[in-house]
Amino acid sequence: MTLYIDPPNWPGHGRMWSHLISDVSFEELHAFAERLGAPPRAFDGDHYDLPSRRYEDAVAAGAVQVSSKEIVRLLRAAGLRRPKRRRAAG
């Protein structure tokens, strides 16, 4: 079981965020996120958004640190990449 996390480089809502993924299954990802205490609303289609304050917790729990580009590559290679949802105009 390997989970991956990128550095908290993504701004939003006054914080910086990381992406947590699995390269095996969403079940594995959800189980890991639950153990971390990440709320279900943090799941964004193919990853969990974790605030920077939780980055070290995820690494201590076993998530492997990788670049943001590697996150996308791993998701695609595993067939788990989901396209971004389109927002309605206006």
Image: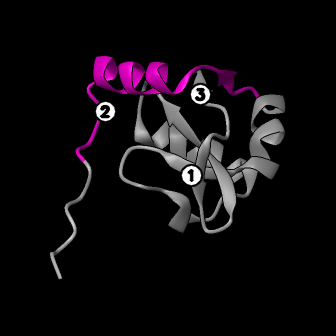
Q: Give the alpha-carbon distance from disc 2 to disc 3, as whole Å.
A: 13 Å
The amino acid marked with disc number 1 is Asp
User: Which residue: 52% across, 68% down?
Assistant: 41
Marks 3 and 1, how far apart at CA: 13 Å
Name the residue that disc number 2 marks: 80
User: Which quadrant would residue 76 be assigned to in this image?
Assistant: top left
Q: Residue furthest left?
A: 89
Q: Tell me, for residue 71, which label it has, or none.
A: none
Element at label 3? strand
- Residue 66 drawn in magenta: yes
Mark closer to the chain start, 3 or 1: 3
Residue at which label 1 appears: 49
Q: In the image, residue 4 lies at what x, y percent? A: 59, 26
Could you tell me which quadrant the C terminus lies in? bottom left
The mark that comes first in sequence, 2 or 3, is: 3
Q: Secondary structure at mark 1?
A: strand
Front in this rendered view, residue 72 or 2: 72
Q: Are marks 2 and 1 in contact (CB under 8 Å)?
A: no
Say which quadrant the N terminus sits in: top right
Q: Which residue is mark 3?
A: 3
- Up the image or down, 33 lies above or below 25; here it is below
Could you tell me residue 50's position as x and y percent?
65, 51
Q: Nearer the viewer, residue 83 or 11?
A: 11
Taking 73 as reference, is 85 left or right?
left
Q: Residue at x 38, y 44 (%)?
A: 46
The picture places residue 68, in percent across and down from the top left corner, at 51, 27
Which type of secondary structure does the marked residue at label 2 adopt? loop
